[in-house]
């Protein structure tokens, strides 16, 4: 039986960071966690896949909460004349009940981020594009932009088949057992019409950290 470990949690404080940075006592922990989850849900509902959001980082100071959104489409988040950012900031401040700073970071190469690659493949599957074509194109684009390796796994009733199976695509090397390896990982699901959910997992290897 295999022991499966999330590649990101295994590398925390080595070459990965927590997505929420704060400390709380027993009395406040539940409240802080609930607020963070509500903010992440709000951003997901308001922007969804349109903004190609890779990561939401939350950092708390005594009288200020900083929320940083990393996105491949900063223009969608900011909105016309900055109205989108202002609306989002107001909604977030209502959840936290304190002053909030909202930062937008633009991602230049979305093909090098596992979450964006996985969601792109999932959207193609939902639009009935052939899954092998979607996987091979995504893997080739990632390798072309300088990744050392990529591994993509699809599972479910692929192509509308009666029996579920797993399909894998590996290009380059993906050393999952090397702790120093900088590996980005994400998993998501696609709703394939008439065949239920298709699982999508993506690992991207960007090289070793010193």
Image: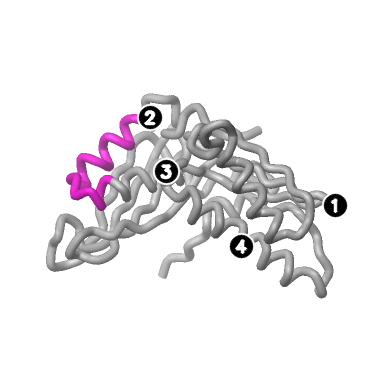
Which mark identifies residue 50? 3
Q: Earlier in the sequence, mark 1 or mark 3?
A: 3
* Quadrant of the snapshot with the N terminus: bottom left
Q: Tell me which residue sits at (27%, 45%) in the image.
A: 124
Up the image or down, 182 lies above or below 193; here it is: above
Considering the image in quadrants, where does the C terminus appear?
top right
Residues tagged 1 and 2 counted as in contact (Cβ below 8 A) = no
Q: Earlier in the sequence, mark 4 or mark 2?
A: 4
Q: Position of residue 194 (x, y in %)?
A: 17, 64
Q: Are marks 2 and 3 in contact (CB under 8 Å)?
A: no
Mark 3 Cα shell of 10 Å, populated few (<14), some (14-19), many (≥20): few
Q: Which colouring convention does the figure follow?
A: one colour
Q: Pick out the residue farthest to the bottom.
A: 27
How far apart in space, not on screen, are marks 1 and 2 (Cα)? 44 Å
Callout 1: SS: loop
Left or right: 170, with 192 as reference point: right
Mark 4 and 1 residues: CB-CB less than 8 Å, in contact? no
Q: In the current view of this chain or complex, which residue is farthest to the right? A: 62
Residue 136 is covered by the magenta coloring: yes
Give the CA distance from mark 2 to mark 3: 24 Å
The reply to whether callout 3 and callout 4 are in contact (CB within 8 Å) is no
Instruction: Calculate the distance from the C-alpha at mark 4 to the C-alpha at mark 1.
Output: 19 Å
The local secondary structure at tag 2 comes to helix
The first of marks 4 and 1 along the sequence is 4
Residue 112 lies, in percent from the top left, at 46, 34
Q: Mark 1 near mark 3, Cβ–Cβ under 8 Å?
A: no
The mark found on residue 63 in the picture is 1
In magenta, the rendered stretch is: 124-143
**101, above or below 208, in the image:** below
**200 with respect to 74 (left or right):** left
Query: Which one is closest to the eye, mark 4 or mark 1?
Result: 1
Q: Which residue is identified by label 2?
A: 143
């Amino acid at each position: 039986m295999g022991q499966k470990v999330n590649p990101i949690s295994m590398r925390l404080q080595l070459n990965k960071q927590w997505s929420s940075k704060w400390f709380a006592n027993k009395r406040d922990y539940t409240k802080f966690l609930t607020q963070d989850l509500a903010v992440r849900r709000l951003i997901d509902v308001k922007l969804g896949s349109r903004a190609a959001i890779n990561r939401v980082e939350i950092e708390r100071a005594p009288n200020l909460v900083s929320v940083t959104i990393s996105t491949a489409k900063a223009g969608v988040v900011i909105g016309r004349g900055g109205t989108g950012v202002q609306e989002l900031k107001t909604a977030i401040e209502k959840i936290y009940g304190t002053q909030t700073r909202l930062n937008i970071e633009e991602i230049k190469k979305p093909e090098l981020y596992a979450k964006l690659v996985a969601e792109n493949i999932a959207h193609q599957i939902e639009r009935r594009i052939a899954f092998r074509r979607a996987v091979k194109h995504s893997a080739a684009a990632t390798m072309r932009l300088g990744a050392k390796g990529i591994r993509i796994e699809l599972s479910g009733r692929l192509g509308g088949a009666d029996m579920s199976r797993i399909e894998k695509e590996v290009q380059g090397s993906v050393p999952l057992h090397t702790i120093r390896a900088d590996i980005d990982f994400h998993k998501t699901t696609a709703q394939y019409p008439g065949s239920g959910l298709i699982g999508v997992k993506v690992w991207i290897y960007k090289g070793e950290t010193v």
